[in-house]
Image: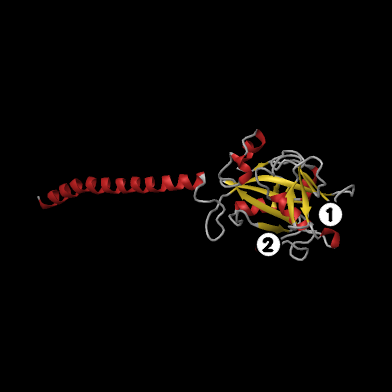
Amino acid sequence: MYKPISNCHKEDEIVVDVDSGRSRICKQVELGNVTANQLYCCPSPKDSGDCFPINNNELLPDNCPQNKRLAHCHNLTNFDACRRTDLAANRVCGWQDGLFCLTVNGGIPTGSYYNLFPEAAKLMLNRNEKESYNGTKFYYDNVSQTYQLCDSSACDWNLNCPDLFQGECNLYTWRNISGGVPGFPRYVKGELCEVNKIGGDTKTISPDSSLWKNLAIGLPFAGFLVGSLMVGLIFWKKPWRARTIAHNTT
């Protein structure tokens, strides 16, 4: 079943199904049209169309502009952040037969100030166990040209994150220049999205998930049961056929 995780007033910039509160990416998951661990760009709720995958996860204003929505769905059977055992993580990670989807209320802005934002946006949607806690901060390392996890409270951060599994407003704050520069806010909606269809090249659940295990166990048993019934029917019909032949010859 569908289960919303976050709850925030800014989610009206993401939700496309007002009655259920679902995002566009979640509705596509339910149709079996989303691949786990793939970055997607989705239309805004006011526009029509489907989410589409971003090739090589290369985020640019050209392939997912500011008026779009970024989304990423995780298979919980192998999601690193699900190594956590606290209550916030357990209410998400214990739900194995679906995907945990995160959607940002915007795409990639244009302008030189936002040159470092695409990589920060990816972190908003995909953090490992160590990076997934509330108050996690990252700084941009000019040498490696990557975001690095702050190792002290005195870190001059570029990205400030809430708990990845937070149930309230998932507000992320990003800034290009460290220090007292005002932050650029982004809100992220978290959802548990049920997979109702599996097939084709867009399988969303890995073979080690509980759903696949149930199928693997149930299908052979069903085949054995049907075979047993067929054999029993054959043996049941033989005496009846013999009696019928005997009757016809007398």
Expressed as whole percent of the image width and height from the top left, the position of residue 100 reads 64, 46
Spatial CA span between label 2 and label 1: 23 Å
Residue at the far bottom in the pictured view: 62
Which residue was labeled with disc 2?
54
Structure colour scheme: secondary structure
Q: Residues within 10 Å of mark 2 (few under 14, many from 20)?
A: some
| Residue type, numbered disc 1 | Asn
Residue 16 visible somewhere in the drawing: no
Q: Residues within 10 Å of mark 1 (few under 14, many from 20)?
A: many
Helix, strand or loop at disc 1? loop
Query: What is the count of numbered marks?
Result: 2
Residue 45 relative to residue 98: left or right: right
* Image quadrant where residue 50 sits: bottom right
Which residue was labeled with disc 1?
176
* Image quadrant where residue 152 sits: top right
In the image, which disc is placed on residue 112? none
Residue 93 visible somewhere in the drawing: yes
* Image quadrant where residue 117 sits: bottom right
Q: Residue at x 16, y 47 (%)?
A: 243
